[in-house]
Image (cartoon, rainbow, N blue to C red):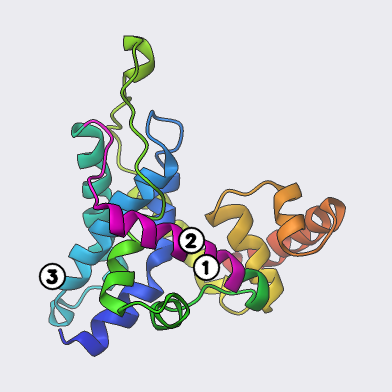
Amino acid sequence: MNNSIKKPLAEENLGLVHLCANKFRGRGIEYDDLYSAGCIGLLKAVKAFDTERGVKFSTYAIPVILGEIKRLFRDGGTVKVSRSLKELALKLQRLREEFLLSNFREPSISELARLADADESDVSEALCVNQPVISLTASDEKESQIDIPIDSPDSEIVDILALRQIMSKLEAKDKALLELRYFKGLTQTKTAQALNMTQVQVSRREKKLLTQMRKELLE
């Protein structure tokens, strides 16, 4: 697969990483580290994917992403990255948040590269970091234990992919609301702050959107 196909494939499927990482919240590893490992899996899937296999990219990528996240548990919960990559990752996180607030959508890799004045290849790699690595080493043995997941949430993730397809048809602000609530894990209060709404407005709009999406899923 050539680079002209690989780049948009990675950009369009970052949501898969959030979906996979969300399934392992609260199991002993910070979400940012789960996301970083998942991004590494996504990049591996993009590089190895063969369009002639006759399967959807998401079907191929999910096990690869989950595999990298599970590897993180086995390795003790740390993702090793260089200082320069960490610094770029922090910069990109700020730029992504600013872009989302202004445009109600995620920026593309090329847009982030332009805003950060960095190479697209460096931006792609830095997106796998997202946040500085947080050490899970603790003095208390009980606090440092990591709950290694056994069951794979593949089927749940595939179900949620259908929701993303429906979300693509929504207005920009509605899509941003659901992205912040269900793919980034923000509370209604924080979502309201990000979208210049009140918590009550977010709650009402969210309920209406979920009802609308349920109807479309059942049709």
Disc 1 marks a residue whose amino acid type is Arg
Stretch in magenta:
76-99
The answer to which of 112 and 46 lies nearer the viewer is 112
**Residue that label 1 marks:** 96
Q: What's under tag 3, amino acid-wise?
A: Ala
Quadrant of image for the C terminus: bottom right
Query: In the image, residue 109 lies at what x, y percent?
Result: 39, 77
Q: Earlier in the sequence, mark 3 or mark 1?
A: 3
Q: Is mark 1 on a helix, strand or loop?
A: helix
Question: Which residue is more in the foreground, 27 or 81?
Answer: 81
- Mark 1, Cα crowd under 10 Å, few <14 / some 14-19 / many 20+, is some
Q: Residue at x 37, y 69 (%)?
A: 13
Cα gap from disc 3 to disc 2, whole angstroms: 27 Å
The disc label shown at residue 93, or none: 2
Q: Is residue 24 above or below residue 43?
A: above
Where is 22 relative to 45, above or below? above
